Every structure is written in structure tokens, then in C-alpha cells.
Image (cartoon, grey):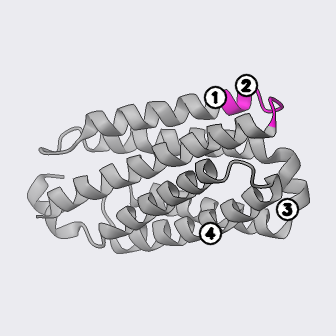
Amino acid sequence: MDRNNLKWNINHWYLKLISGLLFFVIGFMIFYKPDVSYMSIVILFSYGFIINGVIECIFASSNRIEGWGWTLTMGIIDILIGIYLAVHPFATAAVLPYMFGFILLLKAGMGWAQAIEDRHIEGSSKTALVILSLLTFVLGVLILYQPAVGSMTLVYTLGCAMFVIGFYQLSLAFNLKKLKS
């Protein structure tokens, strides 16, 4: 798809901006209050994933361009994960490191796919998407490799991951805005 056709097909680019800011705020809150209880993190993330999932679904539905189904799928997965986290907080606390490790790997894969999809679009910031996706992948692998390291390490790793995902979403939002104009 060339830049002119894509320009007219991008709607609501600012939803990615809101999503990025949401993850950035979650990351900031984690670093601002590192002593917050593990259960509070479960609840905070449940709402964060539900809201992000809704934003992703709206974005995918309003932008039926190539690859929109993957964005919709990730939005639905985020909503389901958020609901699960909210309904089963104690069970979730036991498997939280694994869940977030796999979620980060999925987000990294989506970032790589977006960079590959944008490879022919002039003005696209593919390098930033690849670097941020790589960082997301590394953080996901670290969580999966050492899930029992301790709650504070997990808290800080999750905080870093939220910043990286937030920056990725912000980068994507500005990239989409630039393509739209």
C-alpha cells in the first residue's frame, strides 16, 4: 500500500497516543511507588490491559488496512487478560511473571510485524519500532528466565517494560500522524 492510499485509511491515530501514555503512566506509577503491594499491581494492570484492549479494538475497527486483524486480535487478548486479572487476583499473582513475560513477547512480535509491514512506506520510523520491539522482547525473556527473582525485581522490570511499550505506542502514533498528514 502506498503512502497516498494509506494516508486516507488511517483513522484515530491518536488512540495509539492515548495507549502509549497509559503505559507510560503505569510505568511511572510503578517507579514512583515501588513499595506498592503485589496485589495492587495485579489490579492496576488488569484495568490497564482492559483499557488498552478496548483502544486497540477501536483502532483496528476504524482502520481496516492491511494487518488490522492482528491489532484487533491483540486488543481482544488484552481485554481477556485484563478481565482474568480482575476476576482472579490471587491466582493471577502466582502466574503474573509468566503472563507478563508472554505478553511482552507478543507485543514485541507485533512491533516487528509492524516494522516489516511499514518497510515500503516512506517516512516511517521503522528503526525506532525495531529497537523498541527488541527491548520489549529482551524484557519479556528476562521475566520468563527468572520469574521467582523477587517481587521488587519483577516490579522494576515491569516498570521498564511499561515505559518501553509506552514509547513504542507513542512512536507508532506519531508515525501514523505523520503518514496521515
**Mark earlier in primary sequence (3, 4):** 4
Q: Is residue 46 left or right of residue 69?
A: right
CA gap, disc 2 to disc 4?
A: 26 Å
- From the image, tell me which residue sits under label 4: 50
Q: Amino acid at mark 2?
A: Tyr
CA gap, disc 3 to disc 2?
A: 23 Å
Q: Residues within 10 Å of mark 4 (few under 14, many from 20)?
A: many
**Mark 1 touching mark 4, by CB under 8 A?**
no
Q: Residues within 10 Å of mark 3 (few under 14, many from 20)?
A: some
**Element carrying mark 4:** helix
Mark linked to residue 145: 2
Within the magenta stretch, is there residue 100?
A: no
Residue 129, position as x, y percentages in the image? 34, 40
The residue shown at (40%, 69%) is 59
Within the magenta stretch, is there residue 144?
A: yes
Q: Amino acid at mark 1?
A: Val
Mark linked to residue 89: 3
- From the image, tell me which residue sits under label 1: 141
CA gap, disc 1 to disc 3?
A: 23 Å
Q: Is residue 61 left or right of residue 161?
A: left
- In magenta, the rendered stretch is 142-150
Is 15 located above or below residue 96 in the figure? below
The residue shown at (69%, 43%) is 155
Residue 139, position as x, y percentages in the image? 58, 33
The residue shown at (54%, 48%) is 162
Q: Is residue 45 left or right of residue 171?
A: right
**Mark earlier in primary sequence (1, 3):** 3
Residue 33, position as x, y percentages in the image? 66, 53
**Mark earlier in primary sequence (3, 2):** 3
